[in-house]
Structures are given as C-alpha cells and as structure tokens.
Amino acid sequence: MSAPRSLSARAIGRRGLVVWALLLALLALGLLAARLLPEPLAGAVPFGIAATQAGLVAVLFMRLGRADALIRLAAACGLFWLAILFTLTLADTLSRLLNT
C-alpha cells in the first residue's frame, strides 16, 4: 500500500472552487428545469440533478474514489439505510392517502 499523496493548500483550494462552481451551475440548472420543463419532467429532472450534486460531494469532497474499502462500505450502508427510510416514509404516506 502506497503512502497517501499530500496535496498543497493551493491545489485543495482550487479543487474546492471548481466543485463549488459545478454545484452552483447544477443548482441553476435545477432551478431552470423546475421552472421551464413540463409537469411530468419538472419533478424528476431536479432529483437527478440533486443526485449528481450528491455524487460530486461524495467523490470530490469526501474522496470516496480513493478511500479504503471499509470507508466505502460505510458510505454504501448509509445510502442503503437512507433508501430504507425513504421507502418506509413513502409507504406511510401512500397508506394515509389511500385510507382517506
């Protein structure tokens, strides 16, 4: 296993600015998509853009691309648990809507 490569403060700051600019561009794209797209797509496209933003944060800020296997496993478990929570919330909401 090789030693981790250290980055200079300038390189870290440059990478942060690039990711920040990408996140802002995706935010503007999401706002435009929600405003201009027809109704069926207006709900789905911003979720895809938000997933892209989350992926950028995970890969570039959290450095999951170069992380150890245990750290990647912990991140995957967090996503799995989040999916379970979304599923349970959706099931509860839909059951309340169907009962009224």
Image (tube, rainbow, N blue to C red):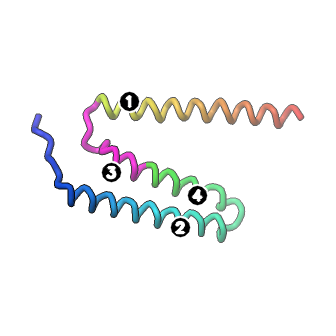
Q: How crowded is mark 4: few (under 14 residues within 10 Å), some or many (20 or more)?
A: some
Amino acid type of the residue that numbered disc 1 sits on in the rendered structure = Ala
The earlier-in-sequence mark between 3 and 2 is 2
From the top left corner, tell me how far across and down residue 44 is, in percent: 62, 55
Are circles 2 and 1 on residues that touch, CB within 8 Å? no
Q: Are marks 3 and 4 in contact (CB under 8 Å)?
A: no
Residue position marked by numbered label 3 in the rendering: 60
Does 20 appear in magenta?
A: no
Task: Kindly report the distance in space between the C-alpha atoms of the residues bearing marks 3 and 4.
Answer: 21 Å
Q: Is residue 85 above or below residue 31?
A: above
Between disc 4 and disc 2, the foreground one is 2
> Mark 3 or mark 4: which is in front?
3
Front position in the image: 61 or 30: 61
Quadrant (top left/top right/bottom left/bottom right) for the C terminus: top right
Q: Is mark 2 on a helix, strand or loop?
A: helix
Query: Which residue is nearer to you in this view: 91 or 8?
Result: 8
Dot 1 falls on a residue whose secondary structure is helix
Which of marks 1 and 3 precedes in the sequence?
Answer: 3
Residue topped by disc 4: 46
- The amino acid pointed to by label 4 is Pro
Q: Which amino acid does label 2 sit on?
A: Ala
Residue occupying the point 53% across, 67% down: 28
